[in-house]
Amino acid sequence: MLLPGCQLKPALPQVFHRLWAVMGKLQSKLRHSTYKYSRPDGLMEEGVQTKVSQEYSPAHVDAVSVVATLSSDLCVSGGKDKTAVAYNWKTGHVVKRFRGHEREITKIACIPKSNQFFSASRDKSVLMWDLQGSSQPRQELSGHALVVTGLAVTHLCWVPREPYVLQSSEDKTIRLWDSRGLQVAHVFPTKQHIQTHCEVSVDGYTCISCSSGFGGEGCEATLWDLRQTRDRICEYKGHFQTVASCVFLPKSMALMPMIATSAHDSTVKIWNQDTGACLFTLSLDGSGPLTSLAVGDITSLLCASFYRGVHILSVDCSQELALQEVAAF
């Protein structure tokens, strides 16, 4: 997904086309979720949250693979029902549905400060859509070689204010591509497991990637330096299954820099970016694998899941850090 706030590069459809070709009803109900909170003294407190959360009209009829923010109140999601859905997550209403793919939608990339977005699918096509336009895609980029030597690209994102694209892959590496000549500018040290996602910080200085795994083996997120050294800075370990998504949290959320991860173990974790300490764990019981995570606004996260659609999570740092589900659609 494109990083919120980054600048749209010239000829974005063409660049993404070439890169991918080269690289391959409102009701209330009780919700039960478990949480763990890391106290300042280092002890972990565990409890169960039983609360009333809003159940909005569902956006999809099957598993949701990806969610991305289009604006401060709109998101776009896609999944196994082959449909991209623009949704107002603050009011709980579908804004528009976009149909055109023949297989599952795997990625959504929203263009910042616009009404346009891209959807990528297992049908090997990328479609460009306009929220204010017709129900037909504005542009179709087909014929992609999405699998190169048997290994698939798992994610792409721009580095702000730079001509570079960061790419994660099933070959267990993170690559930095120069979009001007489509050449590899840097390959980060190979990890032990498939790299499922990558994200770049707003300042462009660091990036995070996350790993597949099982039983706690792998299942980590890694912070990398994007400047001269390009070294590994920190690792975040604590998930027990594949970590599917990772995001930098807005600096306005707390005094310390934080990141969030979602995983196939049905948990969302918030971490201290600098120390690697897990600050909070929220378990979304009954949701199945959590597939995608996006920052909604300065106090909200959107989390896609296999069985319960998209969750709206509230992040509260006013006193002790708290993360809870407030709605789902």
Image: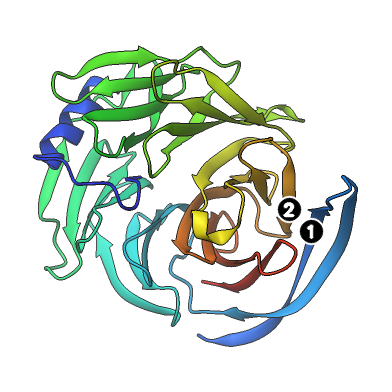
Q: Are marks 1 and 2 in contact (CB under 8 Å)?
A: yes
Query: In the rendered structure, which amino acid carries the disc numbered 2?
Result: Phe
Q: Residue 153's spot in the image, x, y percent?
A: 37, 27
Name the mark on residue 280. Answer: 2
**Cα–Cα gap, marks 1 and 2:** 7 Å
Residue pointed to by mark 1: 35
Label 2 Cα neighbours within 10 Å, binned few <14 / some 14-19 / many ≥20: many
Residue 257 on image: x %, y %: 57, 46
Colour scheme employed for the rendering of this structure = rainbow
**For residue 243, above or below residue 4:** above
Q: In which quarter of the image is the N terminus?
A: top left
Q: Residue 132 occupies which quadrant of the picture?
A: bottom left
Nearer to us: label 1 or label 2: 2
Q: Which of the 4 image quadrants contains residue 68? A: bottom left
Numbered disc 2: secondary structure: strand
Q: Residues within 10 Å of mark 1 (few under 14, many from 20)?
A: many
Q: Position of residue 55 (x, y in %)?
A: 58, 79
Side of 184 where 242 appears, left or right: right
Residue 212 visible to an observer of this rendering: yes
Q: Is residue 158 above or below residue 259?
A: above
- In the rendered image, residue 70, in percent from the top left (x then y), is placed at 31, 62
Of residue 217 and residue 123, the one placed in the foreground of this image is: 217
Sequence-first tag of 1 and 2:
1
Secondary element type, mark 1: strand
**Type of amino acid at the residue the image marks with label 1:** Tyr
Q: Is residue 63 visible?
A: no
Query: Up-down: is 85 above or below 145?
Result: below
